[in-house]
Amino acid sequence: MSDVAERSLVRQWHELLARHAAVFGALEAKLQKRHGIGVNEFEALERLATCEYKCRAADLTQAAQLSQSTTSRLIARMEREGLVERAMCDMDRRGIFVMLTEAGRRLYAQAKPTHRAVLEEVLGAGD
């Protein structure tokens, strides 16, 4: 790889990191201020809201881009707040399903317009 190509590649990487930080920071601030949740909670709510009925905990790990232990703590916190419920998988007793409660559905419906407005504001509709 030439020096020019390497510098271009690293520049693109840094631009991607900066854009991610800008979007994540704006989302975190608005969601926290208006709805009392962070980006990770919103991403979990959105994943659950788009599941047919219930999702495996592992699906939330992937959707929120978190580690398994961080996702477990997130689910436990959301369960304490009454946003989700956990259930054991009938087919595989090691599997855990997570389902939105009515409170979780309401919070998602309230927070979704904020999320989308921040995305539009920071990323731009035409980008």
Image (cartoon, rainbow, N blue to C red):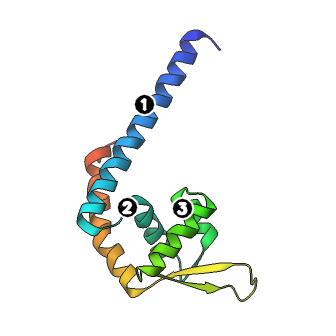
Q: Secondary structure at mark 1?
A: helix
Q: Amino acid at mark 3?
A: Ala
Q: What is the x, y in percent for residue 108?
A: 36, 73
Q: What is the x, y in percent for residue 109?
A: 32, 75
On-image quarter of the N terminus: top right
Q: Which residue occupies 71% across, 89% down?
A: 90
Q: Secondary structure at mark 2?
A: loop
The mark closer to the camera, 1 or 2, is: 2
In the rendered image, the vertical position of residue 13 relative to residue 65, given as above or below: above
On-image quarter of the C terminus: top left
Residue 63 is tagged as: 3
Q: Amino acid at mark 2?
A: Gly
Judging by the rendered image, the residue that carries numbered circle 2 is 38
Question: Disc 1 and disc 2: Cα gap in Å?
Answer: 23 Å
Q: Residue furthest bottom?
A: 90
Q: Residues within 10 Å of mark 1 (few under 14, many from 20)?
A: few
Q: Residues within 10 Å of mark 2 (few under 14, many from 20)?
A: some
Nearest to the observer: residue 13 or residue 29: 29
Q: Which residue occupies 30% across, 61% down?
A: 31
Please tell me in which quadrant of the rendered image residue 110 appears.
Answer: bottom left
Please tell me in which quadrant of the rendered image residue 101 appears.
Answer: bottom left
Q: Is residue 16 visible?
A: yes
Relative placement, left or right, of 43 versus 31 is right
Question: Disc 3 and disc 2: Cα gap in Å?
Answer: 14 Å
In the rendered image, the vertical position of residue 123 relative to residue 18, given as above or below: below
Q: Amino acid at mark 1?
A: Glu
Judging by the rendered image, the residue that carries numbered circle 1 is 15
| N-term mark: 3 or 2 | 2
